[in-house]
Structures are given as structure tokens and as C-alpha cells.
Image (cartoon, grey):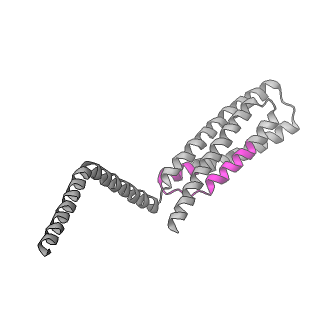
Amino acid sequence: MEQMEDLKSDYTKVMKDAIVTMSSIVFIINIFISKDYIAILMNSFTYITSQGLTFYSLNPHSVNGKLRRKIITYAAIWFLPVIVLLLIITSKIELSNFVVCITMWVLKSVLSLLSLFIIFASFADNTDTVTDKEIKLKSEMKKNLQQEYDNQQEESIYGPRNRRASNNRKTREFIESGKKKKGED
């Protein structure tokens, strides 16, 4: 039963990494392809919210994992009001194209760097969240595989000798049984 829990945990980690990586790459592509300022802000809002909640729900076991979690959750906490503020400002005030362009490129750069950091943090968290059970299971598995390999090597090295010895023993038994039969007759 515990092994099933470990497998579920491993599967969850892999799926989390895949989902975080895909969503981050799609987000980076979307913010650089999009020409609409509001679309970038809305996409950023949903992405940062989901990633902030994802990393907030993690419980890393190492100091570095806790630091990464703290950075991402604080970044989400600080970016969300900024994005909402920018949405309000752009809907109420007509900004010049120059200001919008500069703000867009700064926002795109910062958000793409944050996305890359989120991908890194997602994969780094897997090494930090390895439990004692997983370590014990992996060491037992490695020990069993090594033992199997050693047995196969021994069998391949000593196999012909053991077969000859077995055949010699069977021949000796056959000859002795034949001598006993002659002695009885």
C-alpha cells in the first residue's frame, strides 16, 4: 500500500512538472505574440494566480525549497495588485503609445523571467521533496538490482563448470547404481 502511495506521489510530481512547464512556455509565447496590452495583463493575471496557488500549496522539506516557495508566492502577491492597477489605469486613462510600449516590454521581460524561474523551481522542488520512504525504496531497489546482476554474472562465469560438475555427479550416480545392480545379480 505504501508503494502505491509513493507511485502516486512520483506521478503527481511528474504531472506537476509537465503542467507547470507547458503553461509557462505557452504563457511566454502568448505574451510575446500578443499585441494587445489588456490581453497580456489578463493572461498574466490568470497565470500568476495559478502558479502562486500551485507553489503556495507545496510543502518543501529543504531551506532552498522554502525559499523558492516564498519567492514565487511573494512575487504572485506583489504582481497581482500591480496587474490590477495597470488594468484599471489603462481602462480609465488613455496612455500614449510610447508609455504603453515601454510598460509592455518591461512587463513582458519581468514576467518571462518569472516564468523561467517557476519552471526551474518546479523541477528543483522534486529533489527537495524526496521523502525518507522514497530514499529507502530506491536504495532497496538498487540493492536488489545489484544482487540480481551479481547472480547473473556468477551464473554466466561458473555456469559451464557447474553444469559439468552436475553431469559428473549424475554419471557417477548412474555408474554406481549400475555396479550395485551387477553386485545384486
Tell me which residue sits at (73%, 27%) in the image: 102
- Residue 66 lies in magenta, yes or no? yes
Q: What residue is at 47 percent from the left and 54 percent from the top? A: 62
Range shown magenta: 44-69
Residue displayed at 50% across by 55% down: 129
The vertical placement of 25 against 52, above or below, is above
- Identity of the residue furthest to the bottom in this view: 184
Quadrant containing the C terminus is bottom left
Q: Position of residue 123 (x, y in %)?
A: 54, 46
Could you tell me residue 169's position as x and y percent?
Answer: 19, 61
Q: Residue 86 in the image: state x and y as whole percent.
A: 78, 39
Residue at the top extreme, as displayed: 98
Spot occupied by residue 35 in the image (x, y as percentages of width and height): 79, 29
| Magenta residue check for 185 | no
From the viewer's side, name the closer residue of 5 and 84: 5
At a point 16% along the width and 62% down the height, the residue shown is 172
